[in-house]
Amino acid sequence: MNRKKLMERITIDPRVCGGKPCIRDTRIFIAVILDGLAEGMTAEQIQDHYPQLTIEDIHAALAYAAELSNENIWKVAASS
């Protein structure tokens, strides 16, 4: 799945979870997924905790983090 499609899985809505970035149609923060991965959890373990997540959702969280670390995230949010 290309980066643009992955980023479409992310929502930032001030009316949902205080505007924190989440996986589309959930209230699962991107930070929760990234924290799990940083702690050494596998994608499968994260899916066990959050069965509504797909592997693409986890990849989207990583893509979001990559964009943020490249300081490109403002461009993604502005183009939505």
Image: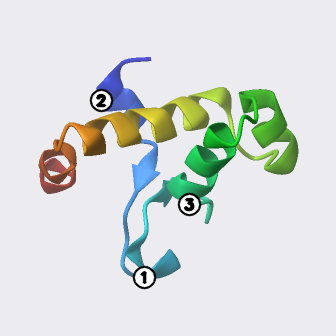
**The N terminus lies in quadrant:** top left
Task: Classify mark 2: helix, strand or loop.
Answer: helix
Q: Measuring 53% from the left and 56% from the top, which residue is drawn there?
A: 31
Q: Which residue is mark 3?
A: 29
Which is more toward the observer, 27 or 67? 67
Q: Measuring 56% from the left and 45% from the top, which residue is drawn there?
A: 34
Real-space CA distance between mark 2 and mark 3, rounded to the nearest whole angstrom = 19 Å
Please, what is the three-letter code of the amino acid marked with disc 3? Phe
Question: Is 39 situated left or right of 5 in this image?
Answer: right
Question: Is 39 situated left or right of 57 in this image?
Answer: right
Which of the two discs, 2 and 3, sits closer to the camera?
3
Q: Measuring 20% from the left and 37% from the top, which residue is drawn there?
A: 70
Residue 7 is situated, as x and y percent measured from the top left of the image, at 36, 38
Residue 72 is situated, as x and y percent measured from the top left of the image, at 16, 42
Please, what is the three-letter code of the amino acid marked with disc 1? Arg
**Which label sits on residue 68?**
none
Residue 59 is situated, as x and y percent measured from the top left of the image, at 53, 29
In contact (CB < 8 Å): disc 1 and disc 2: no
Q: Which residue is mark 1?
A: 15
Question: Is 15 situated left or right of 72 in this image?
Answer: right
Which comes before the other along the chain, label 1 or label 2? 2
The residue most toward the top is 1
Real-space CA distance between mark 1 and mark 2, rounded to the nearest whole angstrom = 24 Å
Please, what is the three-letter code of the amino acid marked with disc 2? Lys
